[in-house]
Image (cartoon, rainbow, N blue to C red):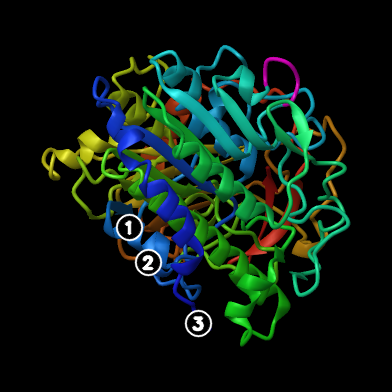
Amino acid sequence: MFMRPFATSLAAIVGALALEGSLTGGARAGDTRPNVVVILADDLGYGDISAQGGRIPTPNLDALTRSGVRFTSGYVTAAVCAPSRAGLLTGRAQTRFGFEFNPVGRDERVGPPTTEVMIPALLRDNRYDTGIVGKWHLGKSPGYHPLDRGFGSFYGVLDGGTSYFPDPGPGPGDEVAATADLKSFNRNRMPVYRGREVVEAPGHLTERFTDEAVEFVSQKREVPFFLYLAYTAPHTPLMAAKTYLDRFRNIEDTHHRVYAAMVSSLDDGVGRLLQALEATGQRDNTLVVFLSDNGCPFYIRGACSNAPLSGHKALPWDGGIRVPFIVSWPAKLRPGVSDRPVSSLDILPTIAAVAGAQTPKTAEGLDLVRLMGSGGRGRAERTLFWRMGPNHVVRTDRWSLVVVNKSETAEDPESLVGRPVPDGVPATVSPLGQYTLLYDIRVDPGQTVDVAARHPEVVSDLKRRFSAWDASNIAPMYTSRRQFSIEVNGRKVQLFN
């Protein structure tokens, strides 16, 4: 496996933008608040980036980590797409407002309640230019569209994904791995939009999203901007352009080769965006946050990695909810690596603070810039919580408690994609009961050894904390249509997503 240096493909863009550098970021003499860019990968594994020991070279993400803080215990609020995005954009656990499960089959009419304040609306009301490029997945009907939730511009997909290539499919030399959901993701069913209008999107979608993001940050404006760049990569269907496949021609397995090419394309996209910020003189005063919406999945034949964590997307172990998490602001934030448990809930309070906006009283996170600026002084233990139907998780600095339904059977992971259960089936505690598993994260980050029997007092304490937190949640607004059973670490478990 090898990586060709990424430089020449950007030369023309950088050269053109450099001429405008003094006219963009530097032109805002009266407003020195930072720009904000949130880059969200889709199903990127904890161990998929080379800065965290991944086997796929990601030099641009590695460079981003060197310019900021890499949080090795960075979490999202759900192990699947839509609920995780709802938690990120509202700064509240999605279980507070009933958006607990993926809205399978309900995308047309379901989204986070319009009473929930999202980051783009917060910033729009504080004179920020707001734009989204990429995946929305939080509602399509009037009131739920991104243009109705505070974004001034939108280019991307409203659904959970789409084909990376325009119909009828890849061109000569491009490649597809035959993932189980290949037929369901196509442009006819899941089109690309500009605003509210369907548009053509030539080439590979990851590169097209990068083009749009570069154009957005390069615009002349008198106010700071907020860009939410939500890539669909490397979510299935696995599709890659020849340019990137050539980098990994030595990988024989098709799934592994295509996935590596997709991650490489995503990494180049991050590099292009950062170089555009540099060329326009805006990089130092731009807060950049990079993370994934959840861990990488179990149904793509081992092509991705959550190493050294246990579990995958859709699972309540750390492999489902602990993700690459990087925060960079060269003008204000000292680079480094931190093992503090942090959450995507922290993104809204952080952005509100740097933008001079009033943080909503309902927000549940911390200001990460202030937290890291303390230099580690006065560090208090933090407790994070998750609810996925009857299954739930509690994480402190040291401990991780996983409570999950028992199952008699275990299904083939690849057969689960595209096979939702009927609507209306409640997510309840299994008749067989539940496993109560306790892990000492300090000595066992991979969650391989259950120590619940050795520390009953810790189990009781974490259960008590969960009950207190759960008291402020509400019932799900719809039932889970992703109810399935698989085997994890030798245990057959039932999951709800």
Q: Nearer the viewer, mark 2 or mark 3?
A: 3
Vertical placement of 86 versus 264: above or below? above
Vertical placement of 289 versus 478: above or below? below
Q: Which residues are magenta?
A: 140-144
Residue 239 x %, y %: 72, 64
How many angstroms separate mark 3 from mark 1 (CA)?
A: 21 Å
Closer to the camera in the image, 184 or 19: 19
Q: Secondary structure at mark 3?
A: loop
**Could you tell whether 432 is left or right of 354 in the image?**
right
Q: Nearer the viewer, mark 3 or mark 1?
A: 3
> Pointer 2: what residue?
51
Does residue 492 show up? yes
- Circles 1 and 2 in contact, beta carbons < 8 Å: yes
Label 2 neighbour load within 10 Å: few <14, some 14-19, many 20+ = many
- Nearer the N terminus, badge 1 or badge 2? 2
Instruction: Please tell me which residue is depicted at 27% across the width and 54% down the height of the picture.
Output: 67
Mark count = 3
Instruction: Please tell me which residue is depicted at 60% across the width and 47% down the height of the picture.
Output: 209
In terms of image quadrants, where is residue 65?
bottom left
Closer to the camera in the image, 93 or 368: 368
Q: Quadrant of the C terminus?
A: top right
The tag on residue 65 is 1
The tag on residue 2 is 3
- Circles 2 and 3 in contact, beta carbons < 8 Å: no
Label 1 neighbour load within 10 Å: few <14, some 14-19, many 20+ = many
